[in-house]
Image (cartoon, rainbow, N blue to C red):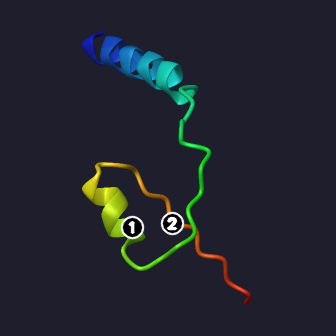
Amino acid sequence: MRNFVAGLMALMLMLVTAHAPATAGADTVTYTPGAVQAAIAKGETVLIHYKSTW
């Protein structure tokens, strides 16, 4: 019974948090040397998108 309750609570928690939207700024910055280091130094989140031609 204890495992059932723990599993049910875990399932409920997963369902509640699964629909939490990810938020990010809408701004983009053209890459320049040091841009990533500067953003990390400010405590900002950095998402690097590499577009390849192959």
Q: Nearer the viewer, residue 48 or 41?
A: 41
x, y percent for residue 49: 58, 68
Mark earlier in primary sequence (2, 1) = 1
For the point 32% across and 67% down, the residue is: 37
For the point 26% across and 12% down, the residue is: 2
For the point 53% across and 26% down, the residue is: 20
Compared to residue 38, the image places residue 9 above or below, namely above
Compared to residue 51, the image places residue 47 above or below, namely above
Amino acid type, residue under disc 2 in the picture: Ile
Which quadrant of the figure contains the C terminus?
bottom right
Compared to residue 32, the image places residue 37 above or below, namely above
Choose top left, top right, bottom left or bottom right for residue 36: bottom left
Which quadrant of the figure contains the N terminus?
top left
Residue under pointer 1: 36
Residue 48, label in figure: 2
For the point 56% across and 62% down, the residue is: 29
Q: Nearer the viewer, residue 21 or 39?
A: 39
x, y percent for residue 48: 51, 66
Q: In the image as oriented, which residue stretches furthest toward the right?
A: 53
Q: Nearest to the eye among marks 2 and 1: give it.
A: 1
